[in-house]
Amino acid sequence: MTNFAELLGIVALGIANGFLYVFMDNWIVSRSDAIATGTFGGAGAPLKHRRYRLQTNLIINTGVLVFICGLLVAAWLMIGRHASDDVQLFAYLTAFVNGVGAVGWLAVLPLHYRHLASILRQAEAD
């Protein structure tokens, strides 16, 4: 494989990686918005269902995002190890960005959970 073809493949994978992360991130945020507003699929949901969604879906979806980012870190490191010198830096940089995404969501999850839980407590009080 020529360096140009290798570089083109790596850039295409990097773009797909970016779109996957943005899709997963927006998916989690839209689920969080539904929990906060109580509207699922255009219909209102009882508080008990909102709390259930908070405790299960948000944790599971965030865990899946962190897991996927971790897998992508490992994949980019393997790609970087076997790539030519010209492409190696791009692969390692993409692995670093995915690692930051995984660690970032792990750091934000407790704050995000507490924020949504406080919104639900306020809705219970009202």
Image (cartoon, helix red, strand yellow):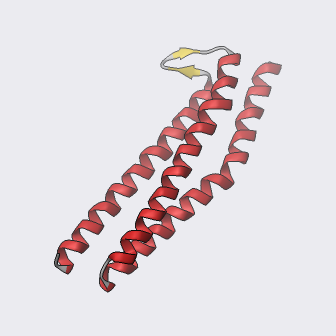
- Image quadrant assignment for residue 84: bottom left
122, 55: nearer the viewer:
55
Look at 65% across and 23% down and name the residue there.
Answer: 50
- Could you say where residue 26 lies in the image, as x and y percent from the top left? 48, 43
- Could you say where residue 17 lies in the image, as x and y percent from the top left? 38, 57
- Could you say where residue 24 lies in the image, as x and y percent from the top left? 47, 44
Look at 29% across and 68% down and name the residue there.
Answer: 10
Is residue 77 left or right of 57 when viewed as pictured?
A: left
Look at 45% across and 59% down and name the residue there.
Answer: 72
Is residue 76 left or right of 111 when viewed as pictured?
A: left
Quadrant position of the N terminus in the picture: bottom left
- Could you say where residue 7 lies in the image, as x and y percent from the top left? 25, 74
Look at 67% across and 24% down and name the residue there.
Answer: 52
Is residue 89 left or right of 126 when viewed as pictured?
A: left
Classify 56 as above or below 98: above
Classify 116 as above or below 39: below
- Image quadrant assignment for residue 83: bottom left
Q: Which residue is situated farthest in the right direction here? A: 125
Number of labelled discs?
0
Classify 101 as above or below 95: above
Classify 57 as above or below 107: above
- Image quadrant assignment for residue 89: bottom left
Quadrant position of the C terminus in the picture: top right
